[in-house]
Every structure is written in C-alpha cells, then in structure tokens.
Image: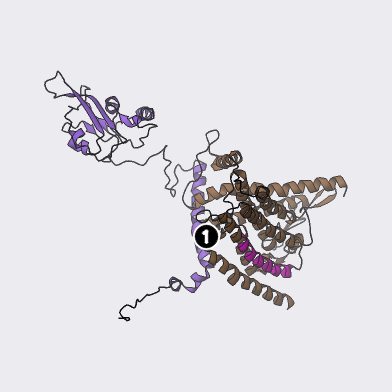
Chain colours: A brown, B purple
C-alpha cells in the first residue's frame, strides 16, 4: 500500500471512528430527554422550535449546546487551575481514544487495496480498551481533587472506588471471553464469531459461548459509564459529585463523556458478545443461508452492510442502557460495593473457571 | 423496677418479605424493564401515528399543552370577577357597598354617585378590585343583591408586571363576559390589558 493511500485511509478511518461516537452521543443527549418522556407517558422537550416546528426536540439540544458554550466559566480562585481546566478533557480524551481498536467493519477493497475497517488492529486490543477506560477515571479524580472542595473530593473518591471495584469484574469477565475465542485482538474476536452452530442455523456469537459473561460484563459496563443505577460519582439529585465546581462547557464535557462512554460500552459489548459487525449468514461474497440458498453480493456492499449492522447493534445497546437508566433507581453506596465485590467478582471468577474447564475438556 | 422499664423493640426485617427471586434482583430488573419498554413501544406507536397525521390525539399521554389547550373548567368554578350590565347597557351595580363590606381581603373599593333614574338607588363612579389581594372566596357574589358582580369569566391566568396592574377598574370589569359568551378576540384583548 502506497504511503498516500495509507495515510488517507487512516485519516478517513480515524475521522469516522471519532464522528461516530460523538454523533451518537449527541443523539443520546436528545434520547435522554425524549426516550424518558416516551417511557413515562410524557411528551418531552417540544417548545424550542425552528421554522415553527420543534423537530422532535432536537432544537432543544442545539439550544442546550449554545447555552453551555456561552455561559460563564466560573473558576474559584482556590482551585488548581491547570488540573481543573484539563480534567474534563482527560475524561473525554480517554473515552474517545478507546474507539481506536474497535473494529467497525471487515474490509473494503478500493483500487485494488484492501483496507481493514479498524483504526489500529492491535494484537492486545482488549487490554488497550480497558487500560483507557481505567485511565478515564483520572479525569474525574483530578476534577474532583483540583476543585479544592470537600464535596467534589468525596465524589471523586466514590468515583475511583466504584471504578476499581468494577474494573476488576470487567477484567476477569473478559478473561472468559479471551479463553473462549483464544485471542486478544478485537478484529480476530469478531472474525471468530462469523461461523455458525446447529448446522448453520445459529450464529456463533459470544453470548452463546459466554452467557453469564455477557451479563456480568454488561452490568459492570453500566457501572463504568457512571450513569444512573450506578451514578455514585455524580449523584446529582441528592449527594453532590465531583463536578460540583464546574460550569459552562467544562461541565458539559463531563456530561458528554458519560454518553461517549455509553457508546463505548455498547460497542465493546457488541464486539465481544454480539458478533461485532457480523451479520448472520453474510460472508464476504454474499449471503449463504442454512436452507441452502445463496445470494451473491459485491464484497464492498457486504462490508458496508456489516458496518451498518455494527451501528445498528450499538444503537440498540445504547437504547437498552438508556432504558435501564430510566427504569432503575440509584443503588445505595453499600449496595454498589456489595454487588461489585460479593456478587459480580465471585461470579466472574466462577465463569473463568467453568470456561477454562469446558475449553480443556 | 428494672423489669418494668425494659423496652421491647420489635425489629421488622424488610428483606424477609422479599422472596429469593426478588432478592436476586436481576429478574425484578427485567420485570421493570418490561413495564417501561411496554410503555415505550405503545407510546412510540401513537407518537408516530400522530407525527404522520394519522391520529389527531395521543390516547396514552395525558399531557395538556397548556397555553394552547386548557382543561375544561367547571361552570361553578370561581374565576376572575366581572360586573354585569343591565339590558340598556348601564351597570347593574347600585353601589350598595355590600361586597366591599363583606370582602375579607378588603380588595374592593367603590365610590358611589347619584343617578337621575328614580328606580336605581345609586351608581358606582369607580369600582376597583385588587386581584392581587383577592382570595377568590366568592363572598362578594353571594352578598350582591343585584346579581351585579359575578365570578364566571373562566379567566385563571391572571398576571401582571406590577402590583398596580393587578387592580381592575370598572371599565375592565364591565367589559368582561361570562366564559360561555366570550370570543377568542376578547380573550386576546384581556391578556393585553392584564399585562399592561
């Protein structure tokens, strides 16, 4: 591959994988208001309008963004200015960077060149993702600590305690998936989910190999996003969180990070347990159905279909996490710790042991 | 002595009332998600129908889009006052001061004047009601011997930028109609007056 081609495709892929979560996060900010309204028999944001129409409430989101950007950025004198300024950026940066190893498609063939649809095909992709999500909590901790405010500091401490508890569960759960797939590369994990079970009727997705693993991973993943059933760090309704001393778009960035992390957890869940970009019975040259019929399509169109399938699956999981967020009340702090250490951790350990035994058999 | 002072505390363990499957919590989460998703899907269905104009109303959403649509008011509801007119257009009020006397909030101010007509006792030269003080008890309506002051305008959104703006004079009170008679144009005019 020529250097020009290499850099062009790399930049294009990077832009795609940056725009995808940011756009979806913006849509989630809208869905946060509108989906909750529809779930609760309300109508939701419908007053701000452009050209006499509210455009399903999207105008509210634009107005909110404008408000965030134009509000006063208030920084009390006692704060550590530098850390206070970069903390929201750190949180956002690591959340976005983790998308670099998520495979969003198989491969496109353009001008005789094969382009793998993944920004960086690291052979330790899983470790990369979890290293970055673990680092993301530094944004919160630095934000809470540099605020020079006891309530913010306590929020930051709650954040780090919660992250540590659930990182361990996620890490151990993923070991089960690694044993089942035999690789650490995310693209290879997705490729391994392209085969079928039961004489070709059932796609061999991760959830069939690791049902308990999926459950544990998803619960711990929701805890990682710091959203409502697990919003110990923020606790906006009663206890006050790490972002107490933040205002304007720096506050907005923390808010937005939660949505980006929701997309990230959805993407990683899809990659591990729901076949990533795989469409059932769709191979590189077209569909091959288990009842024997085939439908040949161009490989590039197949690749685009798979990219669309990945987006669709991620959107579904974002919806599911939003539904959980608007269904469950917040856990108490001791309940969060109980769930993490007394339930998820032993279960994930048992999951690893059982998976290892079955694999050895 | 010591035995008499012993306090017996019965500790009721709430967790004991939960069954095993409820304590696992996962199934309860799924049950809760089922309820919310059920509402989500049904509501979304009707929202889409409404969006494309197939249905005019949304049967499951009780929201009333307030400034545009209002709940129907009961006829007996006490709303903003008005002064009724005689058939020839003059106010029915004879300035007997009954309402001013009975008013517990002291919000009515009447100045009487003489009338040439021997059948009419007096007439109100000015008749001010300070809506800011009014408690909407309806005593003025009960006390009125001429059925001149009524609280049937159906107007509830009474607001002003100043205390003075809450004082309605005789011209405004006379210009109001009963809710059953009022036209949309008059409602708009009234809004402008109240916000002056």
Instruction: Reply yes or no: does residue A177 show up in magenta.
Output: yes
In this rendering, would B102 be left or right of A270? left
Please, which residue is most extreme toward the top here? B116
**In the picture provided, is A294 more to the left or to the right than A64?**
right
* Residue A166, placed above or below residue B75: below
| Quadrant containing the N terminus of chain B in the rendered view | bottom left
The residue at the point 72 percent across, 69 percent down is A180
Direction from residue A133 to residue B189 in the image, left or right: left
* Chain for numbered disc 1: A
Q: Where is residue B109 in the image (x, y as percent from the top left)?
A: 24, 30
Rendered location of residue B126, percent (x, y): 24, 25
Read off the residue under disc 1.
A330
Which residue is located at x 45 percent, y 46 percent?
B58
Q: Main secondary structure of the magenta part?
A: helix
Q: Is residue B142 left or right of residue A46?
A: left
Q: Can residue B113 be seen in this view?
A: yes
Residue closest to the eye, B92 or B87: B92
Placement of A277 over or under B132, stated as above or below: below
For the point 47% across and 73% down, which residue is it? B19
Q: Give the range drawn in magenta.
A: A159-183
Q: Residue furthest left?
A: B118
Residue B113 x, y percent position in the rendering: 18, 22
**Element assignment for label 1:** loop
Q: Is residue B121 magenta?
A: no
Is A58 or A111 nearer to us in this picture?
Answer: A58
Image quadrant where residue A228 sits: bottom right
In the image, residue A76 lies at what x, y percent? 59, 46
Category of crowding for the residue at label 1, using alpha-carbon neighbours closer than 10 angstroms: few (below 14), some (14–19), many (at least 20): some
């Amino acid at each position: 591959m020529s250097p020009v081609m290499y850099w062009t495709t790399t930049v294009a892929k990077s832009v795609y994988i940056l725009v995808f979560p940011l756009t979806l996060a913006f849509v989630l900010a809208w869905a946060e208001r509108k989906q909750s309204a529809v779930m609760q028999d309300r109508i939701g944001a419908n007053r701000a309008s452009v050209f006499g129409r509210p455009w399903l409430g999207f105008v509210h989101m634009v107005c909110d963004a404008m408000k965030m950007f134009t509000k006063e950025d208030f920084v009390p004198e006692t704060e550590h200015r530098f850390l206070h300024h970069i903390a929201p950026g750190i949180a956002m940066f690591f959340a976005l960077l983790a998308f670099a190893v998520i495979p969003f498609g198989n491969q496109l063939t353009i001008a005789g060149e094969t382009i793998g649809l993944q920004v960086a095909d690291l052979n330790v992709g899983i470790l990369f993702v979890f290293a970055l999500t673990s680092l993301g909590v530094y944004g919160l901790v630095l934000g809470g600590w540099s605020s020079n405010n006891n309530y913010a500091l306590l929020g930051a401490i709650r954040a780090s305690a919660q992250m540590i508890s659930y990182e361990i569960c996620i890490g151990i759960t993923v070991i089960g998936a690694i044993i089942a797939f035999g690789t650490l590369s995310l693209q290879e994990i997705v490729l391994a989910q392209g085969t079928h079970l039961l004489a070709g009727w059932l796609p061999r997705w991760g959830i069939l190999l690791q049902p308990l693993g999926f459950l544990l991973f998803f619960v711990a993943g929701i805890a990682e996003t710091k959203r409502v059933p697990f919003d110990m760090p923020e606790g906006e309704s009663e206890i006050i969180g790490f972002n107490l001393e933040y205002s304007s778009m720096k506050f907005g960035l923390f808010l937005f990070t939660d949505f980006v992390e929701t997309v990230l957890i959805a993407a990683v869940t899809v990659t591990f347990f729901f076949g990533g970009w795989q469409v059932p019975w769709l191979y590189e040259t077209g569909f091959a159905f288990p009842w024997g019929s085939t439908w040949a399509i161009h490989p590039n169109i197949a690749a685009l279909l798979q990219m669309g399938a990945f987006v669709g699956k991620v959107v579904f999981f974002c919806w599911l996490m939003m539904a959980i967020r608007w269904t469950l009340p917040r856990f108490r702090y001791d309940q969060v710790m109980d769930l993490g250490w007394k339930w998820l951790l032993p279960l994930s350990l048992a999951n690893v042991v059982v998976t290892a035994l079955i694999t050895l058999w | 002595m010591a035995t008499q002072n012993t306090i017996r505390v019965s500790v009721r363990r709430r967790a004991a009332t939960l069954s095993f499957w409820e304590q696992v919590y996962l199934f309860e989460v799924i049950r809760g998600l089922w309820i919310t998703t059920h509402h989500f899907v049904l509501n979304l269905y009707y929202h889409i129908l409404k969006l494309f104009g197939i249905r005019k109303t949304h049967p499951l959403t009780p929201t009333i889009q307030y400034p545009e649509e209002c709940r129907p008011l009961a006829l007996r509801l006490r709303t903003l006052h008005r002064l009724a007119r005689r058939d020839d257009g003059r106010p029915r009020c004879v300035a007997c001061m009954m309402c001013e006397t009975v008013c517990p909030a002291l919000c009515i101010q009447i100045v009487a004047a003489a009338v040439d007509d021997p059948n009419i006792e007096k007439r109100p030269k000015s008749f001010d009601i300070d809506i800011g003080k009014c408690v909407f008890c309806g005593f003025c309506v009960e006390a009125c011997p001429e059925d001149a002051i009524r609280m049937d305008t159906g107007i509830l959104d009474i607001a002003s930028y100043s205390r003075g703006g809450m004082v309605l004079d005789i011209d405004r009170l006379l210009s109001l109609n009963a809710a059953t008679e009022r036209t949309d144009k008059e409602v708009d005019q009234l809004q402008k007056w109240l916000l002056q």
